[in-house]
Image (cartoon, rainbow, N blue to C red):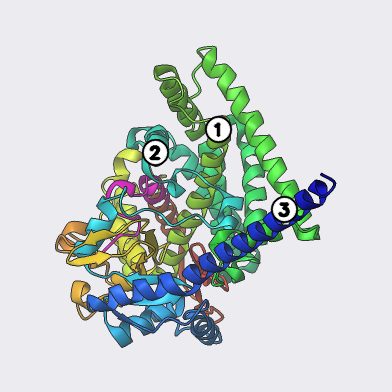
Amino acid sequence: MEGLPLLSTMNLGTMSTVIGVGLLIWWLWSALKWVWLKPKSIERRLRQQGIKGNSYRPLVGDIRDMIKMIKQVKSKPMDPHSNEIAPRVLPYVVHTVAKYGKSSFMWLGPTPRLFILDPDKIKEITNKVYEFQKPDTSPLFKLLASGFANYDGDKWAKHRKIVSPAFNVEKLKVLIPIFVECCDDMISKWENVLASSDGPCEMDVWPSIQNVSSDVLARAGFGSSFEEGKRVFQLQREMLQLTMTLFKFAFLPGYRYGWPHRIRFLPTRTNRRMKAIDKEIRGSLMNIINRRLKLIKAGEATNNDLLGILLESNYKESEKNKGAGMSLREVVEEVKLFYLAGQEANAELLVWTMLLLSKHPDWQEKAREEVFKVFGNEKPDYDKIGQLKIVPMILQESLRLYPPVVMFARFLRKDAKLGDLIIPAGVELIVPISMLHQEKEFWGDDAKEFKPERFAEGVSKATNGKISYMPFGWGPRLCIGQNFGLLEAKIAVSMILQRFSFTLSPSYTHSPSFIITLQPEHGAHLILQKL
């Protein structure tokens, strides 16, 4: 009997050892599958279907070559008159497609990326939203905003249904005075600069355009709470700049599994600031939202701005079906996404349009003549905006050459049929929009040239009914903010053309840069002349 305690201790020790060895074997087996067995199995299945690409290299894949190419293209600017942005913003995609063909793949670590440039396959991908899903949102992007654009399945459908009424065309009509007022403020500042210089003046218009886009969103989004909304957006811009410093890790294996996210928990000055920003943003938005909810419950109208429309839509959905609405935390994320997506994309559409018009004075003059014919010296209003034909053509061509998002991805969590292919689970499908938009097969030999006349009879005619143009996405996940963005751009372009002529400055450096969206890396330097 005296030996039993010793025996029990030995048994416990043996059991602990067995469990430890078992866990180690399980971990090693899981690591082997992730690093080698699964990628090689997928590669074999892709090659059996005639899809080509580099052979898989354990863990790193093609990352080293990607980083080398990115550094190489960024080492010097583009020709200022070239619109061929794909080799700069997606150099490895262009290289792979040139080497292996349009149906080819590369390796982002152990994850294969299959490039899709066939319009029929793109249509299938964009329409089957439950089968071809969004990749897991990167931890860094979650710091900035979550929201329905990052969701899949029923959660995506629920959130989109609630958010959509805020961007109804009829609702946008009441926002036109806000667009006009914000643009007028920007133009007045430009006029003051020109007045002090007594003649044409060089100006980097990019910061002004970013500010006006932010002001439009703050006023349209928050109405009487404009100042609080503007403060929230200023904080989000700062958060965006801080998180950009971590995007250099985006190509490293395991990135999506969260280790860059954990870096922010280290007690560095940047991380402390990010934590403080996040706390202030959430606190401010919760205060604004709670005040609005009290008004809604009291039966008072609050639907004169985007936040009010969103909250009213959510309240009605919650009253209709308990649990069908969004939580307050989810509403906060939708508001954050509204800024992140809207401010960046809207500002970029305007800045690239101005840069293109600065290089094409003939189209600038055609657009100006139309603006004066439609509006005279008056400010734009909704009824007359619909009479514009040339300005929308220019905006569509600007979006073709410089889409806000240069590619989009979908991830397969189980095997799926795509056209004549069977795509294995674990593959990430990439549609390189910037390449698709300049494919000669779809757009002709002048695909890389600025020719707004190609949109004279609308997008469907320009594309011959094919999905070769998708600056706002396609299918059920089509960007709900596109009407908002295009309306803002039509007003801004019209008002600028009424007051200024502009040409490209010799100091302009053409360096389109893509991290989250496509931006002019070194600003937009123009020579402005008051009319």
Q: What is the three-letter code of the residue carrying label 1?
A: Gly
User: Range of the magenta residues?
Assistant: 469-488
Q: Is residue 254 inside the magenta stretch?
A: no
Q: Are marks 3 and 2 in contact (CB under 8 Å)?
A: no
Q: Is residue 485 inside the magenta stretch?
A: yes
C-alpha span from label 3 to label 2: 57 Å
Label 3 neighbourhood size at 10 Å, few (<14), some (14-19), many (20+)?
few
| 460 vs 371, nearest the viewer | 460
Residue 497 is situated, as x and y percent measured from the top left of the image, at 41, 59
Q: What is the three-letter code of the residue carrying label 2?
A: Arg
Tell which circle, 3 or 2, labels the residue nearer the N-terminal end. Answer: 3
- From this viewpoint, is residue 323 visible? yes
Q: Which residue is mark 1?
A: 223
Kindly identify which numbered label has been placed on residue 160. 2
Kindly identify which numbered label has been placed on residue 11. 3
SS assignment at label 2: helix
| 207 vs 317, nearest the viewer | 317
C-alpha span from label 3 to label 1: 70 Å
| 457 vs 345, nearest the viewer | 345
Tell which circle, 3 or 1, labels the residue nearer the N-terminal end. Answer: 3
Q: Tell me if residue 313 comes above or below residue 380 in the rendering.
A: above
Tell which circle, 1 or 2, labels the residue nearer the N-terminal end. Answer: 2
Horizontal side, residue 185 vs residue 421: left or right: right
Residue 315 is situated, as x and y percent measured from the top left of the image, at 47, 22
Q: Residue at x 45, y 29 (%)?
A: 309
